[in-house]
Image (cartoon, grey):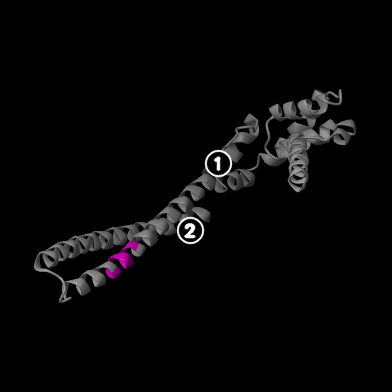
Amino acid sequence: MYSTIIKISFAALLSFTLVAGLTSCASLSESECRAADWEIIGLEDGSKGRSTSHIGKHRKACADYNIAPDLAAYSRGHASGLRQFCTEQNGYNEGVRGHSNANVCPVQLARNFNSGYQRGFEVYQKNREINRLQAGIESREHRLHEISEIKVELEEEIISNTTREYRRRELLEEIKALEREDEALHHEIDEMAITLIRLEESFRQARR
């Protein structure tokens, strides 16, 4: 009896989740479709950098209620929205966030937007490379710490009275290998640190 109730409750919850998911995917609700000011909707889409093809999502959402978008009004609003979106500052903002350039700006506005986007995307790439280098240095430093601990354990085993001669030779070879790895890691860290300093300076200049 109890398990049956659980199964029914789970089925109801799953059904509700699926319906809610489908509803959330629609760009407009029924009430929004019926009260739609298509010029305002176009303005909002354009100001967010969406292409005119985004109206297809609205058309699909409103088709369930037998409502068709006003394409002419949407296009007027969308053009106004793009004039708000297609600025050099917005281009920079899109680039620095790592967003792709959707190339939605009309020719007369694209130059400034693209100029800002290129500067912003350069900052984004430099910042990503800085994070990669920092993570690389951190992982190598972690490995150096591991090597230090392993060497202590091996050295303790070497000096133990219970360790046989052949095992001592093996331990010495292991220690030598760890020392070579240690040296290589220090060299890599030094090189990465130099690159990181240069990149951070370049990053600061790019952000000005």
Q: Secondary structure at mark 1?
A: helix
Q: Nearer the viewer, residue 189 or 174?
A: 174
- CA–CA distance in space, label 1 to label 2: 18 Å
Q: Nearer the viewer, residue 171 or 193?
A: 171
Q: Is residue 48 visible?
A: yes
| Whole-percent x, y for residue 2 in the image | 76, 48
Label 1 crowd (10 A; few <14 / some 14-19 / many >=20): some
To which residue does mark 1 refer?
Answer: 115
Amino acid type indicated by mark 1: Ser
Amino acid type indicated by mark 2: Arg
What span is in magenta? Answer: 143-149
Image quadrant holding the N terminus, namely top right
Q: Is residue 146 magenta?
A: yes
Q: Secondary structure at mark 2?
A: helix
Q: Residue 164 occupies which quadrant of the picture?
A: bottom left
Q: Is residue 69 visible?
A: no
Q: Is residue 134 above or below residue 168?
A: above
| Whole-percent x, y for residue 46 in the image | 72, 36
Q: Nearer the viewer, residue 4 or 50?
A: 4
To which residue does mark 2 refer?
Answer: 204
Q: Is residue 50 above or below residue 140?
A: above
Q: Main secondary structure of the magenta part?
A: helix
Q: Is residue 128 magenta?
A: no
Q: Residue 190 occupies which quadrant of the picture?
A: bottom left
In percent of the image, x 57 and y 42: which residue is there? Answer: 99
In percent of the image, x 83 and y 31: which residue is there? Answer: 38
